[in-house]
Structure formats: C-alpha cells, structure tokens
Amino acid sequence: MGQEAGAAATTEEVELESQPERRTRKRSQPKRQPRYNVVLWNDDDHSYAYVVTMLMDLFGYPLEKGFQMAKEVDTQGRVIVLTTTMEHAELKRDQIHAYGKDAMISSCKGSMSATIEPAPE
C-alpha cells in the first residue's frame, strides 16, 4: 500500500507539471484620444452680449460662465472655451464660425474667430 500511495503522488505531480500554465491577461486600458482646445480669439467687432449669448447657445454655459469667458477673451486676447476630442473640437470651431455677425454692432462683418490646438497632456 505504501508503494501505491507513492506512485499515485508521483503520477499526480507529473500531471500537474504537464499541464500548461495559465497565463493571466493584463487588461489593457483603452487608449484615450488626444485632447484639443477650442480657442476663441478677441476682436473689436463683437459685444460682450454677443459672446455671452453665443457661448450659452453653442456650449450651454450659464450666463455667469459666459460673461467670465467674454471678459477673459477681451482682456487676454483669447479664451479656451472647450477641451475635447479633435472631431468635437472641429465641430464647435465650425459652429462658432457659422454663428453669424453681431447685430448690435453695425460694422461687424461676421462671426468671431476660433481655432483648435492640441491640449497639453
């Protein structure tokens, strides 16, 4: 009986050794798309009311945030209005360009200028 137990253990060990090791897969994190800033540029052809209204209409910002951004574009020359994927940034830039002229300023010739730029990581 002693030999059989020893033989069984040896057979068991051989079976365990012959089984392939399970490889654990590391779950890879999905790659994040690069982020882009939508930059609104200052000019003298648009009023604060126009900028605030445009930001409320196109981005859904509340009045206070729209005014804060209008003030920043006026004093700093530019303001980042959104950071998002390239496709969405291009859409928002195009919406700014298509928004139209400021009806309160007779010399206004059209929409404000906006660009997109890579956001720092």
Image (spheres, rainbow, N blue to C red):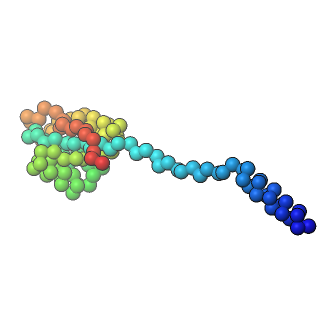
Q: Is residue 20 positioned above or below 116 on the image?
A: below
Residue 35: give x, y in percent of width and height: 32, 44
Residue 109: give x, y in percent of width and height: 13, 32
Q: Nearer the viewer, residue 120 or 40?
A: 120
**Figure label count:** 0
Please state, as top left, top right, bottom left or bottom right, where the N terminus lies in the image.
Answer: bottom right
- Most extreme residue toward the bottom is 2
Residue 82: give x, y in percent of width and height: 28, 47
Q: Residue at x 25, y 40 (%)?
A: 117
Q: Is residue 16 left or right of residue 89?
A: right
Q: Residue at x 76, y 57 (%)?
A: 13
Whether residue 47 is visible, yes or no, is no
- Most extreme residue toward the right is 1
Q: Nearer the viewer, residue 2 or 65?
A: 2
Q: Is residue 21 positioned above or below 90 on the image?
A: below
- Most extreme residue toward the top is 109
Residue 58: give x, y in percent of width and height: 28, 44
Whether residue 54 is visible, yes or no, is yes
Q: Is residue 1 left or right of residue 33?
A: right
Q: Nearer the viewer, residue 108 or 23?
A: 23
